[in-house]
Image: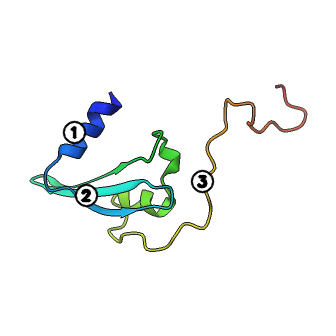
Amino acid sequence: MQLFSNLRLMLRKNKQLVGKDILGNRYYNSLTKTGEKRWVIYNGKVDPTKVPALWHIWLHYTDNQLPKLAEKNLHVPNLTGTKYAYHPQKSFK
């Protein structure tokens, strides 16, 4: 399913690469009859938590400014459900 979704976006006419983040994700936009469309093509595994905060703001039309600052914090994946998940003391494992 993800393959077809990515293929559809890659074949979209009038797409414009607007930027790339520190993790290698590429951000695009295109103008259509119904308005502007924005999307991300992930570098590697699709994981929405890999979108930096400033790019998330842009993707969700909260701000039209493209992010200029480099992210200072590296991505930390969600470890819930793994053996590395946080368990407070006195909790059941």
Q: Dot 1, how many residues are within 10 Å of its Cα: few (below 14), some (14-19), or many (20+)?
A: few
The percent position of residue 82, horizontal first and vertical second, equals 69, 31
9 left or right of 76 in image: left
Question: Where is mark 3, residue-wise?
Answer: 75
Of all residues, the one furthest to the right in this rendering is 90
Question: What type is the residue that disc 1 sits on?
Answer: Arg
Labels 2 and 1: the sequence-earlier one: 1
The residue located at (42%, 53%) in the rendering is 25
The residue located at (50%, 58%) in the rendering is 52
Based on the displayed image, in which of its 4 quarters is residue 46 positioned?
top left
Based on the displayed image, in which of its 4 quarters is residue 74 positioned?
bottom right
**Alpha carbons under labels 3 and 1: distance apart:** 28 Å
The percent position of residue 54, horizontal first and vertical second, equals 46, 64
User: In front here: 34 or 68?
Assistant: 68
The residue located at (47%, 44%) in the rendering is 48
Disc number for residue 54: none
The residue located at (60%, 67%) in the rendering is 72
- Quadrant that contains the C terminus: top right
Question: Where is mark 1, residue-wise?
Answer: 8
**Alpha carbons under labels 2 and 1: distance apart:** 14 Å
Q: Dot 2, how many residues are within 10 Å of its Cα: few (below 14), some (14-19), or many (20+)?
A: some
Q: Is residue 83 above or below residue 53?
A: above
Element under label 1?
A: helix
**Alpha carbons under labels 3 and 2: distance apart:** 24 Å
The percent position of residue 4, horizontal first and vertical second, equals 27, 31
Element under label 3?
A: loop
Element under label 2?
A: strand
Disc number for residue 29: 2
Labels 3 and 2: the sequence-earlier one: 2
User: In front here: 43 or 78?
Assistant: 43
